[in-house]
Amino acid sequence: MEFLVERSKIIEEARSWIGTRYHHQQSVKGVGCDCVGLVRACGNLVGIKYVEDWNYARTPDPPTMLRLLDKYLVKKSVTTMKPGDVICFRVQEDPCHLAIFTGTGIIHAYAKTVKKVIEQELTPYWLERIVRVYKFPGID
């Protein structure tokens, strides 16, 4: 089976967003994006064209987020996580944050402290907050 995009291309695309400032509901490289916007940009590589479904409030709506992730991505086990997969994290109690897994770390638009897209180690802090893992369709 031939896949549309290699996992390395997903990571390469995510890395090209590093430094883009955090901006809620945006997905413009070098200008502004949030964690969903970063995943949307990487999803565009595999032909996922997100529509108005992804309009969301600043206040997290975990059931809607999980429903949309289930709609557009392929849910998989945490134990089979590979570079290029999407991780959904809980913040406090609710699943409401996304990142791209690099193999040893994550790339995400982090609003809490740095307010931009960063790459960082997948620390125990983040590991214990994983709710679900997804892969993009068309990826092995």
Image (cartoon, grey):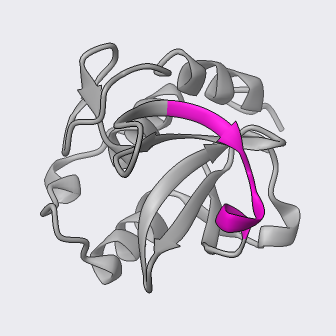
Residue 26 position within the rendered picture, expressed as x and y whole percent measured from the top left? 21, 35
Q: Which residues are magenta?
A: 118-127
Quadrant in which the C terminus appears:
top right
Quarter assignment of residue 56: bottom left
For the point 29% across and 44% down, the residue is 50
Q: Nearer the viewer, residue 96 or 73?
A: 96
| Residue 108 % position (x, y) | 50, 41
Q: Residue at x 44, y 57 (%)?
A: 72
The front one of 134 and 88 is 88
Quarter of the figure with the N terminus: top right
Horizontal arrangement in the rendering, residue 97 relative to residue 8 (left or right): left
Q: Looking at the image, how many numbered discs can be counted on the residues?
A: 0
Q: Is residue 140 left or right of residue 91?
A: right
Q: Is residue 83 above or below residue 16?
A: below
Residue 24 appears anywhere in the view = yes
Residue at 39% in and 39% down: 40
Position above or below: 122 against 2: below
Q: Position of residue 79 (x, y in %)?
A: 87, 70
Q: Residue at x 61, y 73 (%)?
A: 129
Residue 60 sits above or below residue 115 on the image: below
Q: Is residue 114 left or right of residue 58?
A: right
Residue 121 is a magenta residue = yes
**Where residue 119 appears, x then y in whole percent?**
62, 33
Q: Is residue 137 visible?
A: no
| Quadrant housing residue 9 | top right
Q: Is residue 81 above or below residue 125?
A: above
Q: Which of the 4 image quadrants contains residue 65? A: bottom left
The stretch drawn in magenta includes residue 54: no
**Residue 41 as seen in the image, left or right of residue 104:** left
